[in-house]
Image: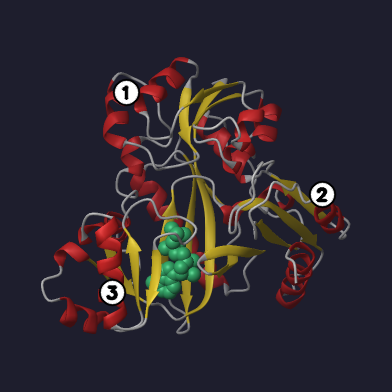
Amino acid sequence: MKRVGVIGGGQLAWMMADAAQRLGIELVVQTPSEHDPAVSIAKETVFAPVDDATATEILAQKCDVITFENEFVNLDALSVLAHQGICFRPRLEALAPLLDKYHQRCYLRDLGLPVPQFLALDEVENLKSKIEYLGFPVVLKSRRHGYDGQGTFIIQDFATLEQKLSDETTTSLNQSLFLLEEFIPFERELAIIAARSVEGEIVTYPVVETQQEQQVCRRVIAPAEITPNQVAEIQAIAHTLLNSLEVVGIFGIELFLGTNGKILVNEIAPRTHNSGHFSIDACETSQFEQHLRAVCGLPLGNPALQCASAVMVNLLGYENSHSDYQSQRQQIAEIPQAHVHWYGKTESRPGRKLGHVTVLLDNQNREQAIAIAHNIESIWYPR
Ligand code: ADP
């Protein structure tokens, strides 16, 4: 396989470029805007939204296999292409149960994996009594197209829930677009990146701790400070899921570690994931190289850390601007063992992921990793 089509041209596609070059692979990208990060590294671009299957048919003519950096695709329309023999990796059947958060929860539960208690709003006859079973606070989520906390609302009481539902439903058709779930008072949030090859071999990256603020990932510490049993449990979850879906490629799995030590699956990303960016600088094989290896039918690489630990910090937009933030980036790059990745976006907006930095460490010390992250944030964000 020499030419890989990528649906989506954001930073996740952009970060495949180095690995593609090393592996002698050309990337062809489907993305709507000429300003999207991956346009600059693509051999060719089909300019179209990711859910435009007619554009994907054109993409398919230019490459040997198609993969995803964005899963908000039109699966029904793509299945027609799959039936014509176009090769998608992961296969469309592996994405199908995941694109709707309610279906995803059902799929995980039916596999016997631990998930928070949940219900779809269309099942609700007596909302008030069902909510009592979940208890407040409760988490209201858009079933589709949520990312970076868009469409996730933590709700404290029934009046606010009713209010929110009437706000949201006037703009977005009806309540069946929502999922309700119990609020997990987690001790930590964790994630694992796992890859599965065409032959069914699975490798997993170290379990990491992720730290979110306002539902958006701010920092990742690799490896997470958890017990070997917890690591084994999370690896087993990854194996069960990837084998069950017969995944080819990388999946990101987000988890909660409860205050009671119990692990629950929060969310599955059927692609490379923000919680795996540390692997570019910290691991022998990055998640991006691993993904390309898997979808091209190559043997998987070594996912192990090449340093004692690492901390990754997202550089999020905090204003509307066209600045390239040269001086802040320069200052961050001067931190020992820091690797700055700048996605080349031409426009900054609050919360937008503009880049990230990974710092490699020669020991495992959570407090020190957090202190380094805070130092980076104090350089990046204005006081
Ligand atoms: P998205 O798809 O937008 O990333 P997630 O479902 O991953 O949405 O939620 C984003 C963040 O919101 C999580 O990382 C977590 O911090 C918080 N969150 C989501 N669901 C719950 C829950 N059931 N209990 C507690 N916090 C939650």
In the image, which disc is placed on residue 152?
none
Q: Is residue 264 visible?
A: no
Q: Nearer the viewer, mark 2 or mark 3?
A: 3
Residue type of the residue flagged with mark 2: Gln
- Give the colour scheme of this rendering: secondary structure
Residue 123 against residue 295 in the figure, above or below: below
Residue 244 against residue 162 in the figure, above or below: above
Residue drawn at the location 31% of the way across and 52% of the way down: 100
Q: How many numbered tags mark residues here?
A: 3
Q: Residues within 10 Å of mark 3 (few under 14, many from 20)?
A: few
Task: Kindly identify which residue carries mark 3.
Answer: 163
Residue type of the residue flagged with mark 1: Leu
Rounded to the nearest whole Å, what is the CA distance between mark 1 and mark 2?
Answer: 44 Å
Quadrant housing the C terminus: bottom right
Residue drawn at the location 66% of the way across and 29% of the way down: 40
Q: What is the x, y in percent for residue 189?
A: 52, 70
Task: Kindly identify which residue carries mark 1.
Answer: 81
- Residue 270 or residue 152, whichever sits in front: 152
Residue drawn at the location 54% of the way across and 32% of the way down: 33
Residue 374 against residue 20 in the figure, above or below: below
Q: Nearer the viewer, mark 3 or mark 1?
A: 3
Q: What is the x, y in percent for residue 159?
A: 27, 82
Task: Kindly identify which residue carries mark 2.
Answer: 326
- Residue 67 or residue 214, whichever sits in front: 214
- Residue 325 or residue 106, whichever sits in front: 325
Quadrant housing the N terminus: top right
**Quadrant of the image where one finds ligand 1:** bottom left
Q: Residues within 10 Å of mark 1 (few under 14, many from 20)?
A: some
Labels 3 and 1: the sequence-earlier one: 1
Q: Quadrant of residue 268?
A: bottom left
